[in-house]
Image: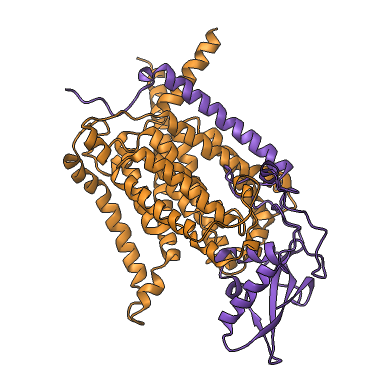
Chain colours: A orange, B purple
Amino acid sequence: VARASKFTRWFDHWMFDEFALSGADLAIFRVVYALAALLLLVPDFEIVNRYPDTFYSPPPGIMAVFTRFPPAWVPTALEIGIAIGLVAILVGYMTTLASWATTFMWLYGNGLVYSMAKINHGSLLFSIAPVFLSLAGWGNRFSLDAWRRGRYRIVRRWPLTLFAVTIGGMFVTAAIPKIEAGWLHLSTHAVQRAVIAAGSGPEFATEILKIHSPIFWEGVDYSTILLETGLVLAALSLRSFRAVLSVAVLFHAAIFFVLGISFVPQVLAYGAFVSWHRLDWRTSPRAAPTRVGTELPALLRILGPPVAIVAVGVALQAFGGLFDSPSTFYEHFNLFTVTKIILVTGSAVALSYLVALAVMAVAAIRRRFVLRRLAHRPT
Amino acid sequence: MEAPAPDAPSSRVGLTQRLLAAGLLVAILAFFVGQQIFIERHAEPYPGLVMPSFASAITPDFVAVSVPVIAVAFADGGGAFVSAQDLTRAGGNTYWVMNNVFNRGLDAKGESLPGLTRPRNVVRRFFDGATPGHVPFSRTNRAHHPETVAWLRNRLGDLYPNREPTSMKIAWATLVYRPDGKRVNSPNQTSKVVNIDL
């Protein structure tokens, strides 16, 4: 009985207290999410209108119930619907309905595109995030909903715990086939194979292929499996989950620069676990303003500096070759550029977090060591 | 009136929410288990909670990659090579579109394999995954279907406005690379040739 009650207490803490993000954190992420989606990631479903129904080859599941592409207006309507949903999420208007509707439209629209070729996993996590976050209450602050209600609803933490478990589980689904295929055999260097198959297009592919050490390539294989199986265990605490997510961000950046595969939407989805309010020390997570008028300046204070920094980065990248020709801006300012900027920014944040954790760990060990020495000092 | 605190510590979570949270956790874990069984028996479902596997492991000596080489013949007696990218306009999905339509369902000579018929029953279609790693209807010949041929004629008409295409040949070339990325064979080694009369 005592053991059961200990487990229950632990479970209670883990499910309902551990992922202690505030309403401000979630709401700021809601704005970041909607802006990123609207500016960078609104999907192109109309591509399916280019092809005949003989190209419709769905994977098992909901899409296989249909036998052909829908009428041409459907993909267009989905794109418009998602844009409307994202604007509603941005301003926090009917946030829960908008979040769920956006997720379902996104899943169906992506299903159409994936029925033509293959399932692209890069945006899956990003598209399902609104469901978890609306349950948590990402519309409870900095939103028209809060202003209309005139009162402030509490944040639920358990949807964030479930979101963390879901992300961890998804990573495990990537690890299982790798293990089955022989990634852990010492004679197989699967990442090396993937880099070769990707060709010399990605920025560092040629450079990394100059490394011939089997220890290096097998080490990369093992590290990948370790990361993909470890994230679900890391979800047992917010700190360890953030630490492993930080490693995952660096992992995604490496994949992009070596394999040319972008997981930017996924990296953005990890932002659900960032304490965004720390960008402005004046915004207390426990403060509970009820009027939009009082919250807007705080939101601008928090998001203003990082948005300005990223904008300067984009401008520097975009105008890097400005004097070559007038069209240079459009040549440089493309999704590839933005992908690089997001991944580099995300990697910087992830590295900073990991360094901060390491510094804290060293300080804690030193403190313990000093306390132990003091305890043993003869009085 | 005092505004409620923005956080919800566990002591404030009611029984309904506790049951809901625990139930959803069990449901998510059960979903992952069920999904994995489905993947092992059939193929990856959509939508599913899955990350990409990149499962294929390297052999120590070489890596083989299959690429489509497309040649078009015109009524004026001339010919031209078309890139799969230009033909399909499918961006990063080009290889997969080509593979689905102009490779699967065809034997080495480009003839139809004994095909699966598309089930009429909705429930059977839902689970119609054929073998692991293959999409449904993967053994259906789509390359020679009249809709595909009509589409190809239109597309090639856009690419070559003043010429009349008469046939198209897709040779699936096998490129073999060494582990350092250097190619060790010529692109003339083909595993499959698909001829389509336009």
Q: Residue at x 70, y 44 (%)?
A: B121
Q: Residue at x 51, y 28 (%)?
A: B24
- Would residue A65 be found to the left or right of residue A244 on screen? right
Q: Residue at x 22, y 31 (%)?
A: A288
Horizontal and vertical percent position of residue A21: 36, 34
The answer to whether residue A15 of the structure is visible from this angle is yes
Work out which quarter of the rendered image holds the C terminus of chain B and state it: bottom right
- Would residue A159 be found to the left or right of residue B141 on screen? left
Horizontal and vertical percent position of residue A58: 63, 53
- Would residue A280 be found to the left or right of residue B185 on screen? left
- Would residue B195 be found to the left or right of residue A162 on screen? right
Determine the image quadrant of residue A29. top left
Horizontal and vertical percent position of residue B82: 63, 79
Horizontal and vertical percent position of residue B106: 78, 64
Front-lying residue, A331 or A53: A53
What is the residue that sits farthest to the bottom in this orientation?
Answer: B76
Rendered view: A147 above or below B197: above
The answer to whether residue A354 of the structure is visible from this angle is no
Front-lying residue, A376 or A169: A169
What is the residue that sits farthest to the top in this orientation?
Answer: A1
Total count of labels: 0
